[in-house]
């Protein structure tokens, strides 16, 4: 709470900074697109909608903006709520997001290896946690892998487009054991184009500013409560496909649709649309950001639609492709990059 | 023109034909070919030979046979289930009707026996289809048994006219019901043909079976009307109630 | 050796924690055909945004692969429906990728059990990563379901061999009740024998199947199995006994399976004897009921006939 006035003072400057930066990103698209176009998809061609286009209209909550504008405004939202981000999730999920995250990480069981006769069956794993600025998922991953599964060969890269969110995570990571800190790296990147990345601080492993995330280098790609803020979700899915190794898993935890239970859904909608922006105004003094949060959840595709988008990007899914949490308030989607044929 | 008169001696009145035409002519009317397919001499088959497992129809199209969708399978399951329940009910109605009717009017014995025999053959046909296609039979089997026997016996106790009105009502509903199924099956077949798929002998056989059975049910309707069904008092109430009951029973057995 | 056991203890706790979620999901499968409904309602509640679905969420191209996967998903929901011989629906209970991981993992069951460890080992064998099996939504239960489904599907060819190469389609008409009983016993035994490979691990599997969220799919598999056994044995009854026969066979099969996990007799002779006893008991009880019903029916008919002969007009 003490930090808030300071942060709010800092916002204008960081906004202009972001603005400039997104302009740089935009100009770099023209050069990166060609390289991005070829290998991503088994259909051998990237559909037009999956190519980031700063001028294409998209949603910002219930407003219509261009993709570039959305990127900036999302950055604005998260810069202003970075400090109170956890409180925001608590409000939206009645505190359940912690349980969901625990379940999400447990269901992925990072660092788990089969018992085999070979001397050291533990395989190294690289986890890329996209939009994971505050480190919620990454810290849990490290705990599961290093402590529960006893596999210190698991490293996690936290990537976020927003430096304010990243620095929150960076601060928090200071309380982790040293071995886990060593396995952690921070990356400032746009999930729709991971070829352009910028390491944060000194703690980067294996990435020089020019290389970005290489093709087929990641075992597990996670994105928790982030993908709905992306300007171009199909592009991000294809980028995930590119960086994942064959057999690698895309896993997404996101607010979803609870409309399988009409009564519950009505109450939930009522709560989110009338109470949350108000609470946001009272608690954090920032009604607009909370209004965006609620609207962006409403705008996010249904479980089945999002599953189809994942399959469309080339992934294969198991079973129905998603798991509802708490009646569909949130859902876990998983997809695997198939082996090359 | 809708169906061949298999027994010329029992040609129905003009009125009934109109009534039947009203119920069974569909706007699409895909079923006008039934008289070609249906050979008048067909006697109720007890055991339609199962299509040989490897039968391939000789159509030249090369796309093979399209797998049934989940929706089509659900439709076929509920269709066979409700047909079996319906034929079970029909046999039991006639079983219940026959003794009281025949005691009053022994001349009805051959007619009742003829109708009963046909219904029993239908029931055997559907029992076989249900088993062969592994469809779950209706769970309310005992309920339908009791209700159908009660309906048959009860209407027969009211008199010959009421019994015939019951037959009229039941067969009208059942005829319309079969027609709807045939129409849907023909739509499936024509859809496959339009897409260039082959249609298996299993389906042609099923459609022909349904047509034959429907025609026989309509024949029963004619018999009922000839035997003073419409003189039953109060005819509208009796048929109305029974038909509503039939529709309810069909709705339920399609689901349970 | 401590490591895996601590995991296997952790997981059930999670399963129970989330069981309410999973049972809700199991109870209300959403037809995939209704895919776009939710999206359109969400747009209608929103402010009048002209760009609607198209721009933000581009229409997903219906690739053939996508359609296939959707169809498979649908078929899996309706597995107990009309069985066509001419237009068979694809019966694949698992997608090709699931199949490749699970079939490789299945080889590790005798040594690793129905565990995540077997799944990961299988994934490695199939050329995937340790993390890959996590896309299986049911985890280790997927491996159990694989066993159940595969052994059920393999029953038909084995039985047709057993009964001298006769096609399993519809069996022979006119089998006597007595012959059918013998065949039911033979087919059930055939299925039980298929557990021999994994019998040492089957108690663990039963424990997993007894977890609340896995009870419905386990029972469904059991129902499918007893339906398959009775069909292959040639039992063609389609009256209420359709239900009672399946119910009693399911109970007997489950009991025999449990018995088998503790059976150390050569070639599971004791289990076979157990199975025979249970089937005989059911036939005896069923016989009593059938006799009772026939007696009541006969007496009622006789009574009605006596009344009719006395001139009572009924």
Image (cartoon, rainbow, N blue to C red):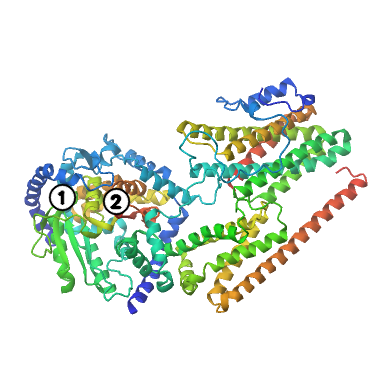
The quadrant in which the N terminus of chain B is found is: top right
Point 67% across, 56% down: residue: C241
In depth, the one of A225 and C64 nearer the eye is: C64
Label 2 Cα crowd, 10 Å radius (few <14 / some 14-19 / many 20+): few
Q: Is residue A102 above or below residue B53?
A: below
Q: Position of residue A178 (x, y in %)?
A: 15, 73
Same chain, labels 2 and 1: yes
Residue B153 visible in the displayed image: no
Q: Is residue C171 above or below residue B200?
A: below
Q: Is residue C276 above or below residue B214?
A: below
Q: Position of residue C142 (x, y in %)?
A: 42, 62
Residue A106 visible in the displayed image: yes
Q: Earlier in the sequence, mark 2 or mark 1?
A: 1
Report which quarter residue A82 is drawn in. bottom left
Q: Is residue B91 left or right of residue B130?
A: right
Residue A75's label in the rendered image is: 1
List the residue tagged with mark 2. Answer: A275
Point 79% across, 57% down: residue: C294
Q: Position of residue A286 (x, y in %)?
A: 18, 51
Q: Secondary structure at mark 1?
A: helix
């Amino acid at each position: 709470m003490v930090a808030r006035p300071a942060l709010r003072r800092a916002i204008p400057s960081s906004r202009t900074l972001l603005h400039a930066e997104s302009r740089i990103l935009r100009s770099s698209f023209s050069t990166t697109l060609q390289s991005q176009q070829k290998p991503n998809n088994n259909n051998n061609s990237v559909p037009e909608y999956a190519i980031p286009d700063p001028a294409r209209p998209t949603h910002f909550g219930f407003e219509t903006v261009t993709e570039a504008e959305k990127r900036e405004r999302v950055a604005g939202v998260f810069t202003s709520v970075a400090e109170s981000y956890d409180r925001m999730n608590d409000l939206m999920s009645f505190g359940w997001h912690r349980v969901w995250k625990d379940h999400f990480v447990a269901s992925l069981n990072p660092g788990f290896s089969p018992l085999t006769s070979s001397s050291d069956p533990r395989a190294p794993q690289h986890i890329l946690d996209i939009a994971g600025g505050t480190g919620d998922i990454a810290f849990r991953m490290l705990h599961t892998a290093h402590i529960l599964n006893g596999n210190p060969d698991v490293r996690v890269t936290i990537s976020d487009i927003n430096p304010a969110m990243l620095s929150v995570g960076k601060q928090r990571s200071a309380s982790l054991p040293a071995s886990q800190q060593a396995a952690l790296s921070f990356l400032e990147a746009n999930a729709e184009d991971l070829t352009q990345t910028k390491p944060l601080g000194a703690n980067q492993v294996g990435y020089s500013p020019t290389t970005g995330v290489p093709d087929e280098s990641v075992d597990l790609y996670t994105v928790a409560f982030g993908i709905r803020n992306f300007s171009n979700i199909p592009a991000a899915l294809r980028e995930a496909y590119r960086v994942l190794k064959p057999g690698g898993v895309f896993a997404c935890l996101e607010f979803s649709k609870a409309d399988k239970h009409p009564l519950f859904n009505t109450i939930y909608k009522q709560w989110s649309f009338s109470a949350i922006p108000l609470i946001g105004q009272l608690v954090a003094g920032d009604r607009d950001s909370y209004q965006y949060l609620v609207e962006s959840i409403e705008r996010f595709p249904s479980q089945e639609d999002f599953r189809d988008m994942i399959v469309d990007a080339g992934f294969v899914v198991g079973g129905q492709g998603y798991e509802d949490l708490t009646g569909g308030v949130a859902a876990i989607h998983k997809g695997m990059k198939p082996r090359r044929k | 023109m809708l169906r061949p008169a298999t027994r010329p001696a029992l040609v129905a009145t003009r009125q009934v034909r109109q009534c039947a035409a009203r119920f069974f002519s569909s706007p699409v009317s895909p079923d006008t070919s039934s008289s070609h397919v249906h050979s008048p001499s067909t006697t109720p088959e007890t055991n339609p030979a199962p299509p040989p497992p490897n039968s391939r129809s000789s159509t030249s199209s090369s796309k093979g046979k399209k797998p049934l969708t989940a929706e089509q399978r659900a439709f076929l399951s509920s269709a066979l289930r409700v047909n079996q329940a319906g034929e079970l009910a029909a046999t039991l109605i006639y079983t219940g009707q026959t003794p009281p009717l025949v005691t009053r009017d022994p001349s009805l014995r051959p007619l009742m026996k003829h109708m009963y025999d046909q219904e029993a053959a239908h029931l055997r046909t559907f029992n076989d289809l249900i088993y062969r296609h592994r469809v779950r039979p209706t769970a309310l089997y005992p309920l339908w048994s009791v209700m159908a026997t009660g309906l048959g016996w009860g209407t027969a106790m009211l008199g010959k006219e009421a019994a015939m009105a019951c037959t009229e009502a039941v067969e009208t509903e059942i005829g319309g019901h079969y027609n709807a199924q045939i129409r849907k099956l023909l739509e499936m077949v024509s859809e496959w043909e339009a897409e260039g798929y082959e249609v298996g002998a299993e389906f042609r056989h099923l459609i022909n079976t349904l047509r034959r059975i429907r025609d026989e049910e309509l024949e029963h309707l004619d018999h009922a009307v000839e035997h003073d069904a419409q003189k039953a008092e109060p005819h509208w109430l009796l048929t109305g109630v029974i038909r509503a009951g039939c529709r309810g029973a069909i709705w339920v057995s399609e689901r349970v | 050796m401590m490591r895996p056991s601590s995991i296997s203890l952790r997981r059930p706790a999670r399963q129970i924690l989330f069981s309410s979620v999973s049972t809700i999901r199991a109870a209300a499968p959403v037809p995939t055909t209704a895919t776009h409904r939710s999206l359109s309602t969400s747009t209608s509640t929103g402010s009048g945004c002209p760009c609607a679905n198209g721009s933000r969420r581009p229409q997903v191209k219906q690739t053939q692969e996508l359609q296939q996967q959707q169809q498979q998903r649908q078929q899996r929901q309706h597995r107990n429906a009309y069985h066509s011989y001419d237009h068979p629906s694809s019966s694949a209970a698992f997608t090709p990728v699931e199949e490749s991981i699970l079939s490789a993992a299945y080889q590790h069951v005798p040594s690793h059990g129905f565990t995540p460890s077997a799944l990961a080992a299988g994934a490695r064998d199939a050329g995937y990563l340790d993390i890959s099996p996590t896309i299986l939504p049911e985890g280790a239960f997927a491996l159990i379901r694989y066993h159940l489904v595969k052994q059920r599907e393999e029953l038909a060819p084995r039985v047709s061999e057993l009964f001298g190469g006769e096609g399993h389609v519809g069996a022979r008409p006119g089998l006597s009740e007595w012959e059918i009983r013998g065949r039911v016993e033979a087919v059930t035994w055939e299925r039980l024998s298929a557990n021999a490979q994994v019998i040492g691990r089957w108690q663990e599997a039963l424990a997993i199947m007894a977890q609340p969220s896995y009870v419905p799919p386990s029972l469904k598999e059991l129902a499918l199995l007893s339906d398959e056994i009775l069909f292959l044995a040639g039992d063609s009854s389609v009256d209420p006994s359709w239900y009672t026969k399946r119910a009693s066979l399911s109970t007997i099969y489950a009991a025999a399976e449990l018995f088998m996990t503790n059976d150390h007799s050569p070639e599971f002779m004791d289990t076979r004897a157990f199975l025979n006893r249970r089937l005989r008991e059911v036939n005896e009880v069923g016989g009593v009921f059938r006799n009772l019903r026939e007696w009541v029916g006969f007496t009622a008919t006789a009574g009605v006939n006596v009344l009719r002969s006395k001139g009572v007009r009924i």
